[in-house]
Amino acid sequence: MDVVLYMRYSSDRQNEQSIEGQRRECEKFCEANGYTIVGEYVDRALTATKDVEKRVEFQRMIKDSDKKLWQAVIVYKLDRFARNRFDSATYKARLKKNGVRLISATENITDNPEGIILESVLEGMAEFYSRELAQKITRGMHESALKCNSCGGHISLGYKIENKKLVIDERTAPIVRKAFAMYAAGQSVADICRVLNGAGYRTKTGAEFNKNSFTSMFRNKKYIGQYKFMDITVEGGVPAIIDEDTFNKVQERLNSHADAPARGKALVDYMLSGKLICGHCNEVMTGTASTSHTGRKYFYYTCAGRRGERNNGCTKSPMRKEWLEKTIVQDTLELLTPDMIEHIADIAIQAAEKEKAEKTAIPTIENEIADIEKTIARLLKLVENGAESLTLANRLNELEKDRRNAERRLAKEKAAVIKLDKPQVIFFLTEFTKGNVDDPEFQRRIIDLLVNSVVVWDDTDDPGTFKFTITYNLTPKKTKTITVKDLSKSKCVFHPDNSTICLKGRVLRSFCISCN
C-alpha cells in the first residue's frame, strides 16, 4: 500500500516529538507493515486546535488526496492530525471519500470511546455540511472561473500564478516538455524517472519523480491550454506547454496500456485495521492479499507476529477479509436497538458539549462577558446612588466597547462549532440502521461507531472455526464473545451424475446454496 506521512510540531509544547522523531516512528511502522512511503507533508510550529486553514501542508495533503495516488496517511499520533473533533471528522470524511485512510503509527486502538462515537456521528453528517459549504464557495468562485482566474488548489508543474492567472513557469516547464516527449517517443515511465532524477529535476513538492508522478500529468489537458473549473471549460484559457500532436500521441499510448489486463494492486479498505488483535500472541492483524493461479485476488487479515522482523512463530491462520468484516458488522448491528440509539445520542451530545468546553474559547469568552457585565452593574449602581464623574463615564464606555468586542468573538467561535441536538442524532442513527450490510461504506460506519477492538482465536479442534471477543464503544454490554465457523472457504465435490453434493450433504442440480 502506498502511503504518505503527515507530521506537525507545536513550538509551544516542548515535550512533543520532534519532526525527526515522528518521521522515525512512522517509517519504522511502515516498514513493519509493508507500506511504501511515497511522500510526506510537514507543518512546523503550528497547533492543531485552531486555524486549520493556516496549516499549509495539511491543506495541500487534503487536496492531493483527490488525485488518489496513495491510499493512507500515516501520523505519529492521531492528535497530529487534529485535536478538534469537528475538524477531524470533516477532514477524515473527505479522505475517506477519496479512498484514503488515516492511520496512527503508535496507537493500535483509536482514542477515547466518547470521542469515537461523537466523531462517527459527525462523519455521517459531515457530507451534508461540506456540500452546503461547497455550494457557497462555488457561487463565489463562478465569476472568477469565467475570467479563467486561478481558483486555488494544486498548481500543475510547469505553471505559476501571476495576477490571479496561470502563466508558464520557464524554470519547470522544460521538465513537462521532456516527460511528454520521452513518453510519446515510446520510452517507459521508469526511463523518464531515471533521466529526470539524474538531471536533478524534482516534483512540485521537491521530491524525486516516481511512477505515480505522471499518472495525472499525462492526462492533464491544461498542458494544451484547456482551462477547467467545475462545469466551466475554456479552450485556450491558459497558455499551452505541450502541442496537441504530442499530447494526442501520449493519450494513444496511455489508452493502449489501459486496455491491457490490470496488473496493479486493487485499492482495498481493511476496515478492522488497528482494531483486530491476535488472541494467540497479542499482535495486531493487518491486511494482506494473495493471487490464485487463475489471477483472482483474495484479501486476508494476517497476524503481524507471523511476518517480517516481528515474526514470533505465531500459528494464527489468516482470515478472509470480506467474511470477517461482514460477520462483525452483522453481530454488532444487533446492538442498535431504539434504547441503544438513544444512549448513543446522549453520549454524542455530552461529548460535543465537552469538546466545546475543552477545545474552544467559548467558555472563556462567556466568563469574560459575565465579568464585564458585573463590573458595569457595579458602576451603574454607583451612578444610581448619585456618583458622577468623567472618569466613571469613560470607564463605562470602555466596558461597553469591551463587551461588544467579546460578544463578536463569541459569535464567531459559536459559528465555527457544529451544533447537535438529540432528535437530530436519533433520526440519523435510526435511518442509519436501515443500511445494507453488504455495502462497504455502511460496514465501515458500523465498525467505526460501535467496535473498539476485536480479539480473535483459532479453534484448534475445529479448523475454520474462530472465537471472537468484541469490545464495544460505551454500550451497556461492554464485551461479547462469539464462536463462528467460516464457510466461505468450503468447497463442494461434484457427483458423477453432474449434480452437486454440498459438504452438508444436500444434493443440488446447479450449485450449493451454502457454499455457492
Image (tube, helix red, strand yellow):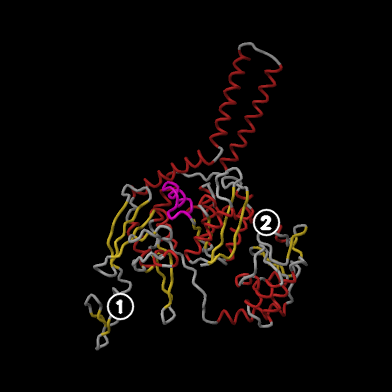
Relative to the observer, which residue lies in front, 231 or 456?
A: 456
Task: Measuring from the top left, give residue 299's x and y in whole percent.
Answer: 41, 70
* Secondary structure predominantly adopted by residues drawn in magenta: helix
| Horizontal relation, residue 247 to residue 460: left or right | right
Relative to the observer, which residue lies in front, 288 or 509?
A: 288
Q: Residue at x 29, y 82 (%)?
A: 510
* Pointer 2 residue: 141
Vertical relation: 504 (above or below) 238: below
Mark pair 2, 1: CA separation: 58 Å
Relative to the observer, which residue lies in front, 312 or 261?
A: 312
> In the rendered picture of this protein, how many numbered marks are placed on residues?
2
Task: Measuring from the top left, give residue 406's x and y in whole percent.
Answer: 61, 33
The range drawn in magenta is: 106-123
Task: Measuring from the top left, give residue 360's x and y in whole percent.
Answer: 55, 40
Query: Which residue reaches farthest bottom?
Result: 496
Q: Quadrant of residue 412?
A: top right
Task: Measuring from the top left, give residue 413's x and y in whole percent.
Answer: 58, 40
* Pointer 1 residue: 491
| Horizontal relation, residue 76 to residue 445: left or right | right
Three-letter code for the amino acid on which mark 1 is drawn? Lys
Query: Any mark on residue 190, and which?
Result: none
Three-letter code for the amino acid on which mark 2 is drawn? Met
